[in-house]
Image: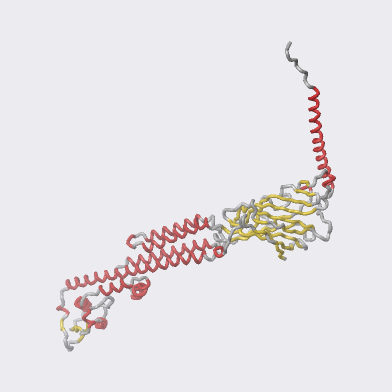
Amino acid sequence: MSRYKQKPFPVLSALQLIGCICCLTVPLCLADNNETQQHERLYQKVFNTKTNFLPSKNHGKPLKVKFGFHLINIVEVNAKMQFITVYAWIIQKWNNHLLKWNPKEYNGIDKLSVKAENIWVPDILLYNNLDEQDRVGGGPSTYKTRVVIDSNGTNVWASPVMFKSFCRIQVRYFPLDSQTCVLTFGSWTNSLRHLDLEAIDIEFPTKYFTKNGEWLVYNISLYRTEDAFPCCDDRFAQLNFAIYISREAFDYLINLIVPCCLISSMIFLGFILPPESGERIGLSITVLLAMTVFQQLTFEIMPAYDFPILGQYYFAIVLEISASLVVTTVILNFYHRTDRKMPGWVKKLLLHWMSRLVFLHGEVKAKYSINQWPPLNAILQIHTKQLNDKKDQRPMTLHKRNDTAGSAGAGYGDNIYGNDQALDNEGIEMRGPSHINTYPFNIKDMDTRGNERKENRDLEDKERKLRHWEWTLAARILDRCVLIVAIFLGIITVTAVFLRAPALWKDIKGLTVDNPINITRSFLP
């Protein structure tokens, strides 16, 4: 026999435990069943009434619907298609006296959530809707959430929604532009005699607002209007939410404006590059092609209408580069002219006037004072050769004037190929044999033609060098003058084009959670 006897299982204790569990669960099940029954009773009461009609107590007063618009994010602003896409939270509140109950009669149930299709809801739509998928822009087809009904008849319908709306986008000052997009909401079928709108005073931005990378929201306003339409005689209430946005231009400045300025500044190098390098025309054409390619790359970004200031700047730069190509061609033409005599008006315009503007007049003055023409005997030989060609055999005498001008010789610019009168004006005087201090000679007794050709060749070489120096100096003067004009013109182009943008003169600051605003309400008749 075992020292310890096995005790029987306590059957009574197990039965007591089961009874306790049943006592605890049965009331809960009964209570849950009772609450479900109360909801069913409440649903039967609510939906047995005619809840799909406009709940208006007094036909003389319209039903007032409170409407709230909470902007959460600006999804897209399309300038070419003229629309804006926003994500927002819509809140609508109204009172339906047909949907009231006493919570005490329904086990304390004071709120009820129902589908929007089962009760009357306001048909407040977005008038300027552009969504191809949601053509209505409001109502149960857009707001998929349920309506919360309070026991006192207050209906609250809150729903997240994405709106795609028309927006007149002015791109004249692109990319330094500011836009104002207005979203207009109103009832489609109920006029002011039946339904009136009242805006819910909201604060913007909330902590749920998400900033857009390109657009900065700096203000939001709300105003109510009343308008009549051709279809109906009555007036309709409208709520207009105006969103004021400004473009973040820093990326456009780095990616579009600065590269364009750098490309256009390459035309300055064309006037600094020496003409003998032979690369001036190639550089100008390369800059023009680079500007054209860059403009084609930015075609998709730039709006194709209203001729924005960025397009104006591109157009002005292309004109300046083309003009620099023409001027470079003229300068190279001047540089490579060696044998042609410079016209008097060109010499006066460039070497005497414009040289002072570009600080090269000292070089012109020094060159003319050093580079004098050949002495008197060389001029005499040339004049004698002209007389031989004319076969003029009359005896002639040369008289040398005693004034200082005759002893100094002929300077540059003297007419050495002129007639007797012109030669006499330069210090050599043709006189008859009766004049005193004359030196009679016969043309046949002149030096040989070989000496004449040598002296004439020396004279022509010196004249050719001087002419080449004149054209080269004229090209240098034009280079420096056009370089200064191009620099000033480039600066004026940038300032005249971009400083017209109003965004540069406004102190635009984006709204933040730390610095929100209360949307004001105003009435515009």
Across and down, in percent, residue 169 comes to: 60, 60
Residue 385 in view of the camera: no
The residue at the point 81 percent across, 40 percent down is 35
Residue furthest out toward the front: 3
Across and down, in percent, residue 225 comes to: 72, 63
Give the colour scheme of this rendering: secondary structure
> Left or right: where does residue 209 sit relative to residue 404?
right
Identify the image quadrant of the C terminus: bottom right
Q: Quadrant of residue 523?
A: bottom right
Residue furthest out toward the top: 1
Out of 55 and 66, give the one closest to the viewer.
66
Q: Total label count? A: 0
User: Can you say whether 103 is above or below 314 in the image?
Assistant: above
> Left or right: where does residue 329 sit relative to residue 408?
right
Across and down, in percent, residue 359 comes to: 35, 71
Identify the image quadrant of the N terminus: top right
Out of 249 and 200, give the one closest to the viewer.
200
> Left or right: where does residue 78 sit relative to residue 117?
left
The residue at the point 47 percent across, 56 percent down is 293
> Left or right: where does residue 119 sit relative to residue 173?
right
Q: Quadrant of residue 11?
A: top right
Across and down, in percent, residue 358 comes to: 37, 70
Residue 473 in view of the camera: yes
Q: Quadrant of residue 339?
A: bottom left
Residue furthest out toward the left: 445
Out of 70 and 375, give the one closest to the viewer.
70
